[in-house]
Image: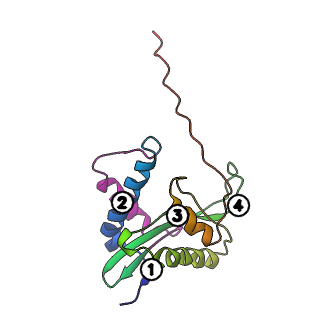
Amino acid sequence: MPLQIVHATAADVPAIITWAEELFRRFHGFDPFRFDVFEQPMAPGFTRFYLGLTTDPDVLIAVARDGDQVMGYVYARHEPRKWDSLIDEAVWIHDIVVGDQHRGRGVARRLVTEVEAWAAARNLHRVLMTTAPANAEALALFGALGFRTTMVEMMKVVPPTPEKV
């Protein structure tokens, strides 16, 4: 069966959770302090999060399928104007992941194309995304798709202050 990109439903959430956990493990490996473990196990939190998003009209969650097998997903959100970031309305790709065994087949490109079509249908002309600097594959892919670097996130760990007696 040919690759299909479809909008996710609640029935897709278990497969999405599998990929979300994989994405988290990858990013946690890049920087465990930045990509923190909120709760263990993480699946219940991911389930609550993604179930809530499947019915949000400002969210696109699309899955890539080969028959009944989910190969990966993308989560994007229509974000309002943000004065603190100096950006007008835009679509922000928050997550995109394709299983290692499915890479090299154009799956991520098709997922991004779906986001772009969703943005265009909303008359939005900016699609943004972030990734870890160590994620060379994502940087190469998004660069090849026409994305360019506009901002760089930086973080400093501030030690706790001693308690006042």
Q: Earlier in the sequence, mark 4 or mark 3?
A: 4
Going by the image, does 127 lie left or right of 163? Answer: right
Q: Is residue 77 visible?
A: yes
Residue at the far top: name it: 165
Q: Say the numbered circle drawn on residue 22.
A: 2
**Quadrant of res 70:** bottom left
Q: Which residue is mark 3?
A: 138
| Quarter-of-image position of residue 165 | top left
| Residue 55 appearing in the image | no
Q: Mark 2 to mark 4: distance in Å?
A: 32 Å
SS category of the residue bearing label 2: helix
Q: Which residue shows up at 30% across the image and 82% down it? A: 68
Q: Amino acid at mark 1?
A: Arg
Q: Nearer the viewer, mark 2 or mark 4?
A: 2
The answer to whether 92 is drawn above or below residue 124 in the figure is above
Amino acid on which the number 4 mark rests in the picture: Asp
Secondary structure under tag 4 reads loop
Mark 3 surroundings: few (<14), some (14-19) or many (≥20) residues within 10 A: some
The stretch in magenta equals: 35-62
The span from disc 1 to disc 3 (Cα, nearest Å) is: 15 Å
In front: 9, or 115? 115
Q: Quadrant of the N terminus?
A: bottom left
Mark 4 and 3 residues: CB-CB less than 8 Å, in contact? no
Residue named by callout 1:
105
The colour style of the image is rainbow
Q: Position of residue 82 (x, y in %)?
A: 67, 54
Q: Earlier in the sequence, mark 3 or mark 2?
A: 2
For the residues carrying marks 4 and 1, which lies nearer the camera in this image? Answer: 1
Tag 4 and tag 1, C-beta contact below 8 Å: no
Marks 3 and 2, how far apart in space? Answer: 15 Å
Q: Could you tell me residue 66's position as x and y percent?
A: 36, 83
